Image (cartoon, rainbow, N blue to C red):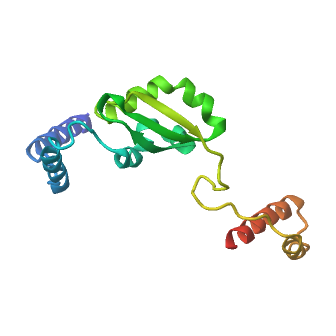
Amino acid sequence: MSEPQHDKEAEALALKRLMKHRAKPVYTPGNKLSLRIAKVMRPYAKDDGPGLPLIQRRWQDLVGPRLAKLSRPVKLTGKKEERILTLEILPSASPIFQHQNEMLKQRLAAACGGFLKDIKLVQKASTGRSATGKAASPPLSARDREEIKAGLDEIKNPQLSAALLAFGEAVYTQDR
């Protein structure tokens, strides 16, 4: 019966210690510097708002990871209420962007300081690049494939052999 009482006392003692030793916020000079710079620059950029580089840097945060993979901002034209943002999108993603046009306008207008009249969609075919930005690798030649198969002849399990063949092909195509 004394154990629950001991636990309560230990808990009360721990809470007392925690109340005395609260964590202090870490000093971050970068945040204060950016606020000072923004304060100095505000009068000079009051009609323009943030530019395209800021939107490009924050693109994934603004539209989400799914839409960020399908598009990228390329141009911001006009001044104040007449701003138009041009997006390059994949043709297959066009219906998604047309459907979410109003939601995107609201989010991007908030990021641009409330100044965004329209979003212009320009369809660009993929340039043979994958999602990571690397060029697509050429397929494995028949000779290389036969070399890999020859090395796997001793393996009796067909599933293991197929898995190792796929792995070998992936390694060979990445090394090119």
Residue shown at 11% from the left, 48% from the top? 21
Along the line of sight, which residue is nearer the eye, 10 or 176?
Answer: 176
Q: Position of residue 59 (x, y in %)?
A: 43, 43
User: Does 148 appear above or below 62?
Assistant: below
Q: Residue furthest left?
A: 20
Q: Position of residue 44 (x, y in %)?
A: 17, 44
Q: Give the quarter of the figure containing the C terminus.
A: bottom right
Q: Position of residue 94 (x, y in %)?
A: 61, 32
Residue shown at 62% from the left, 41% from the top? 90
User: Does 128 appear above or below 83?
Assistant: below
Tell me where residue 140 sits by quadrant.
bottom right
Q: Position of residue 22 (x, y in %)?
A: 13, 45
160 left or right of 131?
Answer: right
Along the line of sight, which residue is nearer the eye, 160 or 90?
Answer: 90
Residue shown at 46% from the left, 23% from the top? 102
Tell me where residue 2 sits by quadrant.
top left
Q: Give the quarter of the figure containing the N terminus.
A: top left
80 left or right of 62?
Answer: left
Along the line of sight, which residue is nearer the eye, 111 or 173?
Answer: 111
Along the line of sight, which residue is nearer the eye, 35 or 54?
Answer: 54
